[in-house]
Image: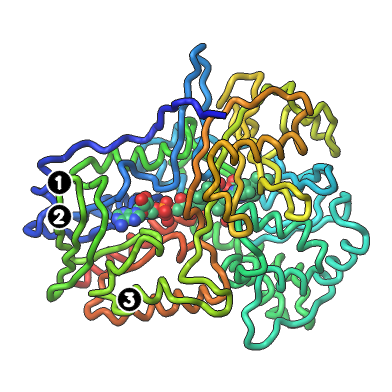
Amino acid sequence: FAPPTSIISTPTATTTTSSCLHASSEAQYDCLVIGGGISGSTLAHNLNNANLNILLAEQRDYLGGNVQSVVHTDEDGSEFIFEKGPNSYATQPSIVRISHELGIDDQLVFANESLPPWVNHNGKLHPLPKGQGGKGPKGQIELVFGPNGVLKFGLAGDLLSWPGKIRAGIGALLGHMPPPDNKEETIKEWVTRILGEEVFFRIIDPFVSGVYAGDPTTLSMKAALPKISRIEDYSYGIEWNKFGAIFYGGLARQVELTKERKADPPKPEWVDFEYGNPGSYKRGLGTLPNAIYEKLGSDVVKLEWTLTKVEKEGDTYVVTFDTPNGQQTVTSKAIVSTIPTHAMGSSLEPVLPGSTDLFTKERQIINRKGVYYPPVAAVTLAYPKKAFKDIELSNDFGNLQNLPGFGLLNPRTEGVRTLGTLWSSSLFPGRCPEDYNILLNYIGGSRDPEIGSMPEGDVIAAVDKDLRKVLLQANAPEPKVLGIKVWPTAIPQYELGHLELMKELESMESNVEGGGIWICGNYRSGVAFPDCVTFGYEHAKVVKEYLDKK
Ligand SMILES: Cc1cc2nc3c(=O)[nH]c(=O)nc-3n(C[C@H](O)[C@H](O)[C@H](O)COP(=O)(O)OP(=O)(O)OC[C@H]3O[C@@H](n4cnc5c(N)ncnc54)[C@H](O)[C@@H]3O)c2cc1C
Ligand SMILES: C=Cc1c2[nH]c(c1C)Cc1[nH]c(c(CCC(=O)O)c1C)Cc1[nH]c(c(C)c1CCC(=O)O)Cc1[nH]c(c(C)c1C=C)C2
């Protein structure tokens, strides 16, 4: 299995021999943004929009971080568009807003919102309802948590057994054991306490794979799924709901969410959208960072700049980078780091004493150092539609050969190594020839870190083997291997003790005399792509307010 050469649709570095002019210790910036992933590049866009004098420094030779879209053209001219990192976003206003500001709103694409995610259980596929917005499979709704913590229920479907449904129903509609005092719960403990083991193994465990590639026995419920965890607090907040039945808290949250949206409605000039609907751009998610790069230009965006040290002289931050032109020093009134914790080393130590230790110290509770980022491989394979199992799916979804859905998750109990498969070309039609399906598979994560050290050919073979068990006919041809990307440090895990760690970081920031430094990123403000875009919008206001007061 060898991936074809592909054209990455992100701009590569331009050699900037004259870059010292802008990035020298003589020019003082209002704000320096370090790290050009989605968090850093959207923040830079918003700061630039506020007319601030900024610099965005990124280690790689493109903006976007783990967002990388590829347009592959076959010898016969047929085109395959796929992603090396994230597949889509659950649409939020921040994404539609920034797309409008960048003039790429005509590039936005939204999936058919009725396409459900599926779960593989006992060799059969079971549709889950959409978290929100979508109609969901007919009468099939078992229970689902949407991205905003909305909870939905139903009684039909055979993903849960009757005892499993009754157990979940009691927990949701009547009540459950209260949370333990003075003990942070894992996702497994929380879900099992409230809804029972079956819901955990058949629904939540795969759901956690499909967001964190994580281990629900080490992830902290409060930190990793805060919106869902808060439903319990809402539930106990309802006076008559003595035993905290969470269904009513879910309803209360839904009402609050509707109010929040009404209070801050989308602008009339934006493209119409449904909250939470899966979305992307015609040529993939990389369209967003590419457009930011084009707008800001190479005077503002410095590619292949690696942060090495942050110091402070009086009121001014003095920041050093390794660059293709040697060491460069930049001075700025404020700085925001959006680089992952594992990349910080001791670069912040001079301004945040103890930060090196904070991000590397052992946490006894789960036996880990700092924030854990497990490896995940994204493997994109295409097969002819006729290679898929020729079976009618339940609930009028049609034939599996057309892959009617968002994708498929494999609970760890099913003996399938691949965590999940996104049905990318069903979500976003037109990304490959009509007679093909593109599958984006994720494999690895906290419970299978060996993936990070396996030869790429073996990873592809493992995914192909799993697909033959679940989706493909036994005689399916070899796949067209479009791409494999092993992310050695993919997604930060919000494990037990994470909130404590973030509190310590916050207190370090506030101890800096005069302020003006923020250490941020997806380990702090949420791992979802839309969370990063929302961070970029909201945090620009914080920086602006700080500078205005200075
Ligand atoms: C495989 C995978 C699939 C995913 N799927 C989805 C999905 O479908 N939907 C969704 O909503 N989310 C998804 N996510 C999550 C989401 O994509 C990420 O959380 C988000 O892109 C992170 O953006 P960020 O800017 O915070 O971090 P990053 O993308 O990690 O950006 C940090 C940047 O800092 C740079 N950097 C590092 N060290 C230095 C240094 N010393 N100096 C300068 N720069 C430095 C890095 O090169 C990088 O560009 C997925 C993530 C992965 C890995
Ligand atoms: C199986 C592995 C993974 C799949 N996606 C990810 C992994 C690790 C990464 C990921 N996917 C989403 C997020 C953001 C979560 C959020 O809070 O919005 C992350 C970090 C999005 C996502 N994944 C699923 C849903 C329903 C959503 C939200 C909707 C959207 O973004 O469009 C479930 C899901 N993930 C995967 C599959 C195969 C799957 C369902 C079938 C893959």
Residue under pointer 3: 509
Residue for point 79% across, 68% down: 195
Is 519 above or below relative to 528?
below
- Does dot 1 land on a helix, a strand or a loop? loop
- Do callouts 1 and 2 mark residues in contact (Cβ within 8 Å)? yes
Instruction: Give amino acid for label 1.
Output: Asn
Q: Residues within 10 Å of mark 3 (few under 14, many from 20)?
A: some
Displayed quadrant of residue 206 = bottom right
Label number found at residue 550: none
Which label lies toward us, 3 or 2?
Answer: 2
Identify which residue, 259 or 365, lies in the foreground: 365
- Tell which of 99 and 26 is nearer to you: 26
Q: Position of residue 533 (x, y in %)?
A: 43, 52
483 left or right, relative to 209: left
Secondary structure at numbered mark 2: strand
What residue type is disc 2 on?
Answer: Gln
| Separation of marks 1 and 2 at Cα, in angstroms | 8 Å
User: Which residue is under mark 1?
Assistant: 325
Closer to the chain start, of discs 3 and 2, is 2
State whether residue 402 is above or below residue 316.
above
Residue receiving disc 2: 328
The C terminus is located in which quarter?
A: bottom left
Which color scheme is applied? rainbow
Q: Evaluate whether residue 43 shows in this view.
A: no
